[in-house]
Amino acid sequence: MATLSIRTLKAEPQGYLLCAMRLTWIALPLAILLPLHLIWHILKLPSPWAMLFLRIAARAMGARVKVYGEHIRKDVFFVANHLSWHDIPILGGITGTAFVAQDGVAKWPIIGWLAKVNRTIFVSRTEKHNVAAQVAELREAIAENWSVTLFPEGTTSDGRGLLPFKQSLFETLAPPPKPIMIQPVLIDFGKVGPDIAWLGEETGWESAWRAFTRPGSYDVGVHFLEPFDPGMLADRKAVCATARARIANALSTTLGYTVK
């Protein structure tokens, strides 16, 4: 976890102004693109509007995104490292992927509803006896959707390392419900990683306030790594280990961090 101390929810007047500007920057496109997305959904057409909105939201929050490598566009399961909720508009704005998220997000005002609209698959961190049901739900989503993204660390880091991956949801891919590739992804915030990261002691509102009042922009690199076929591996442990090894290797070669 990042070691920065928690900032209070107080801010200078310019912080409130910056927050209001960013909320407006996000809300105005949402008012236009959300109805279009819902219409496309009713007509059962692939919607480009959610991806466009997420791209706008990422830029509004200060992200200047640079993409490295080619991402698979259909029948793909992305596995990525996780620093904060910034990861979702950044990665979603590039790929249009659905996400696997902890079920607490579903209860957040506005954000939870938008997550459901974007086909988010909610799983519980605490109800371990429901793992089989969660795996079944995820298998069904994979069978229907073009792409799904999992953050298998289960929590956030500061971007300078990689936490152990949780193996349970990789059961979905051993074997996968249909031919599908796993593409590991490294999200690199560089030097600002510890500042962007969702601190372990923060609430969601504190993290959001810090993001909306953070001055300036930042550069983030999204590295799409070599994909692999989970059907060629023996079990979920092998699938999990392969995905983690590729992200760890990218962290080492790209950023120079040693990952255990």
Image (cartoon, grey):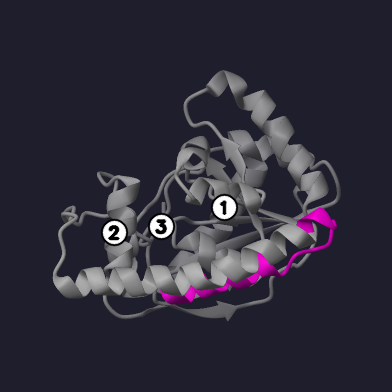
State the mark number for residue 114. Answer: 1
Kindly report the distance in space between the C-alpha atoms of the residues bearing marks 2 and 3. Answer: 16 Å
Badge 3 crowding class, 10 Å Cα cut-off, few under 14, some 14 to 19, many 20 or more, is many
Secondary structure beneath dot 2 equals helix
- Residue 260 position within the rendered picture, expressed as x and y whole percent measured from the top left: 41, 51
Q: Which residue is mark 3?
A: 83
The one nearer the camera, 151 or 20, is: 20
Q: Which residue is mark 2?
A: 209
State the mark number for residue 69. Answer: none
Q: Residue at x 42, y 71 (%)?
A: 24
Q: Is residue 225 visible?
A: no
The one nearer the camera, 85 or 20, is: 20
Q: Earlier in the sequence, mark 3 or mark 1?
A: 3
Q: Residue at x 50, y 78 (%)?
A: 65
- The kind of residue tagged 1 is Leu
Foreground label between 3 and 1: 1
- The kind of residue tagged 2 is Trp
Kindly report the distance in space between the C-alpha atoms of the residues bearing marks 2 and 1. Answer: 19 Å
- Residue 55 position within the rendered picture, expressed as x and y whole percent measured from the top left: 56, 73
Q: Earlier in the sequence, mark 2 or mark 1?
A: 1
| 135 sits left or right of 81 in the view | right
Q: Residue at x 39, y 76 (%)?
A: 62
Q: Earlier in the sequence, mark 2 or mark 3?
A: 3
Q: Do the CB atoms of the residues marked 2 and 3 lie less than 8 Å apart? A: no
Secondary structure beneath dot 1 equals helix
Up the image or down, 95 lies above or below 10; here it is below
Instruction: Give the residues in magenta.
Output: 41-60
